[in-house]
Image (spheres, coloured by chain):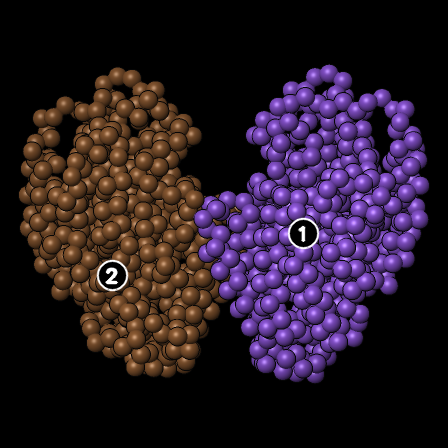
Chain colours: A brown, B purple
């Protein structure tokens, strides 16, 4: 073990400080999205900008480069976790230093402006006004991609992807997405055909008291093992999981007319939260202790939401509780109907409202479009037409306007190119990991039907959560499931659930 | 006006960053005290320590000393606010640089430890276990006082006082406190004599729903002009006003058996909050835009709570609303009883529960004891005996144990020596400022009885709040009231309220 005077231990101290700063920013971000009075937003933006700038300065100090260099000669004295930590440090450092600070600042201003304009443009269904600032964001994101591409020796798109899912490349994504693209449209047709003759799905009648909805969410979170000594459930306009592993702040929103979305939303975020709470405690302040990447993160939320919570076994446990909480009565509350409610498949315009069958088609379209935007094959002005054509081809629906089309997501206005694929990589990983868990855990079905999730969550802790970033996503999935990530389990899951 | 390349404008940028960091810390501190799950406390301590350390580093950079020196040659180009800002910058800088960083760190660790031990010691009523760590805190605080004393050319106690109430000295406090000490014991005797023959005060019977108590607090905060676009009301164990001027987070606590304390507590904090919200908007990120000091801050909370809200005129407005909110009925709810409830005078053991007549005697005792602790005339081991003797002499009560005695306050364990006097300076200032306002505002009584507080709050904005730290406390009080701070108005107020 290295003593306190080594380059490595010096780096650990610096990264612990960075972790404290990013943790502070995470709580402040959560606060802005949940409880901050509107008049606090300018001051909050200044606070977050100061924290971000300071972090950037700490990482960009020449000593950090020197220490990373020196630490190379200390590797014989480092254990596996420390070695992995050093790799993660180096990865963060190279992302922070690959780009000229002026470009970082220009990009940050451009995305702030574009996000603001996007909010207006979306409300007003007015893509044209967004064109200049979105072009600027795409242009500057492209320059960042080029700078990183040169520094990392990978393609510009891969260099962006690397920030969200380290080590992932378009070459890895393409065959997976091609597989899904070959499968999903026909499969979707079969499901829709089959559903044609099914009886109508009944919507339980509200209103559903917010307090009761929250109580139900808390009940299921508790059953799943969410640790309320290290986290909270609150309300925000866009549900998310924020905070830090020791203090996970997850949010949902309640509609009094429909409890179903909020409940699954809460369970989805609980999947993210369990990952955070399960990260290795002794590495909390270090890069190696962080969640591996966005794909694996999404795999944990989708495993809880899609694989577990929408399953017939889970609903056998959940439906009596849901019914009792809302004092439900009648056919709409019967388990068969609740199950069909939660497994409804229908092509639509909006990604975040999509079911698990159509969702990947939304993502693949965005993946193709953002690669084309980055390469220059598609110009921003042509985005609406390309979007709408893509939606017709993939899902057979024709967005009646850009609000229901290319204006629906904040990702591109905020400069996040390379993020979208992680949603569907996560969906595939969720299916593959869940199948592996089910094969290894004795009595999983019985446990689930009895509301006992400890065996599942402990399996996830052991095989995924507690590994932090000590291994690559690929090796984590390989070790947990016995094979590399592929579309097989996801397709099998869809067939089992929707066509048998 | 200085251009962007001057030393002054460079300093403004650095202090804006410091303001963002301290604002971030203020929100995180509020979060810890209100909604943070218990398991988040270690990580939060790391976050706050990182922010504090970074601020210290920013202020201690050699460039800051150089810039402050260079700025001296630019003063001809600076307006009054900029000049005052420069003075405030220099004051913060000298507090930050007067003390050796190792001493700052040792002090910080000693106070953290002592605060923790104090919580236990207080619960267990066990002063002895606290002695070693409290001795250490007193010792290190003394070393800080000596370092600042040498650097600032003032006495060690004054050097500590300067941090809470810049410019204030023991030489200014002594005559004021002597005046009160000569007056209060006899006055208290007269009040108690007079009250002997009064009918008993009736306690309205609860329980009082927390939601209704909160609603009542919000109603009065709104009437007083609290801006909810720039602030919130929440719950904490120890009520306080936190956050930043653009986002004031005030807290209270509710007892279902007694609404009276929470209501006045909320109004007290609203006084602090109105000061924060009324600070000059264009100087928000600079030292000159901050509240002047703790004495003036307390004057604003006590003006709203003691001068205004416990007055017969305010209660004429408030009592019908209180009664209606809780659906009160009977003699306990009549205005005469509510008024007597809010003006009860009774010597007691606990400072925070004390009425405005006995409160200064609690403070003066602490002022004398902390000066003796700092000078070495009193050793920590002898504190309980000295405390109890002081309580007998000042208030005629004999604390039955240290929990009701010298263990009640967190100030000394947290290293805050020099803070206590500001409470009573604030009480005196509140009376003096309120009298001045009443003399200048036409129809103030009628306004108050009608629940119209705009005239009062605007007067406070103009004469106190909007001045920020652009002038000294002395000149603000002199300008607002026509005379230096003295005990006259406070004594007259007590006579008017309790003996006429």
Quadrant in which the C terminus of chain B appears: top right
- Is residue B372 toward the left or the right of residue A407 in the image? right
A202 versus A147 height, above or below: above
- Residue tagged 1: B128
In x, y percent, where is residue A433? 17, 49
Closer to the eye: label 1 or 2: 1
Image quadrant of residue B394? top right
Asked if B110 appears above or below A324 in the picture, the reply is below
Quarter holding residue A25: bottom left
Label 1 Cα neighbours within 10 Å, binned few <14 / some 14-19 / many ≥20: few
Residue in view at x 35 percent, y 23 percent: A326
Inter-mark Cα distance, 1 to 2: 56 Å
Quarter of the rendering containing residue B114: bottom right
* Quadrant for the N terminus of chain B in the image: bottom right
User: Which x, y percent locates residue A10?
Assistant: 41, 74
In the image, residue A243 lies at what x, y percent? Answer: 41, 52
* Residue on which the image places disc 2: A165
Horizontal side, residue A290 vs residue A482: left or right: right
| Secondary structure category for the residue under label 2 | loop
Establish if A60 lies above or below A406: below
């Amino acid at each position: 073990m290295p003593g306190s005077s080594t380059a490595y231990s010096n780096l650990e101290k610096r990264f612990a400080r960075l972790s404290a700063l990013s943790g502070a920013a995470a709580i402040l971000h959560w606060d802005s999205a949940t409880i901050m009075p509107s008049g606090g937003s300018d001051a909050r933006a200044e606070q977050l900008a100061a924290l971000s700038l300071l972090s950037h300065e700490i990482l960009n100090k020449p000593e950090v480069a020197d220490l990373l260099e020196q630490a190379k000669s200390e590797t014989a004295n480092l254990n596996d976790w420390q070695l992995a930590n050093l790799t993660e440090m180096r990865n963060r450092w190279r992302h922070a230093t690959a780009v000229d600070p002026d470009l970082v600042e220009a990009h940050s201003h451009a995305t702030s402006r574009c996000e603001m304009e996007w909010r207006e443009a979306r409300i007003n269904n007015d893509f044209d006004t967004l064109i200049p600032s979105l072009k600027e964001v795409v242009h500057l994101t492209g320059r960042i991609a080029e700078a990183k591409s040169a520094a990392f020796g990978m393609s510009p798109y891969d260099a962006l992807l690397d920030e969200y899912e380290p080590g992932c490349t378009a070459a890895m994504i393409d065959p997976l997405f091609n597989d899904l693209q070959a499968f999903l449209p026909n499969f979707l047709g079969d499901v829709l055909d089959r559903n044609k003759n099914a009886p109508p799905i009944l919507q339980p009648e509200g209103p559903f008291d917010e307090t009761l909805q929250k109580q139900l969410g808390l009940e299921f979170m508790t059953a799943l093992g969410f640790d309320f000594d290290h986290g909270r459930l609150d309300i925000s306009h866009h549900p998310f999981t924020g905070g830090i592993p020791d203090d996970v702040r997850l949010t949902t929103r309640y509609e009094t007319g429909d409890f179903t979305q909020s409940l699954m939303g809460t369970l989805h975020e609980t999947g993210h939260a369990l990952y955070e709470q399960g990260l290795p405690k002794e590495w909390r302040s270090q890069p190696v202790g962080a969640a591996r990447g966005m794909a694996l993160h999404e795999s944990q939320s989708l495993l809880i939401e899609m694989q577990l919570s929408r399953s017939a076994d889970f609903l056998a446990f959940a439906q009596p509780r849901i019914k009792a909480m809302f004092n439900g009565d009648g056919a709409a509350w019967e388990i068969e109907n609740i199950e069909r409610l939660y497994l409804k498949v229908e092509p639509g315009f909006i990604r975040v409202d999509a079911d698990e069958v159509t969702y990947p088609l939304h993502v693949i379209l965005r993946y193709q479009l953002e690669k084309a935007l980055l390469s220059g094959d598609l110009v921003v002005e042509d985005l609406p037409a390309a979007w709408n054509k893509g939606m017709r081809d993939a899902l057979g629906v024709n967005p009646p306007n850009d609000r229901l089309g290319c204006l629906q997501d904040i990702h591109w206005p905020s400069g996040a190119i390379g993020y979208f694929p992680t949603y569907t990589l996560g969906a595939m990983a969720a299916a593959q990991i869940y199948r592996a868990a089910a094969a290894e855990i004795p009595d999983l079905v019985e446990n689930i039907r009895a509301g006992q999730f400890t065996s599942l969550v402990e399996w996830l802790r052991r095989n995924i959560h507690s590994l932090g970033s000590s291994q690559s996503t690929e090796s984590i999935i390989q070790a947990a499931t016995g094979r590399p990530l592929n579309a097989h389990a996801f397709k099998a899951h869809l067939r089992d659930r929707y066509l048998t």
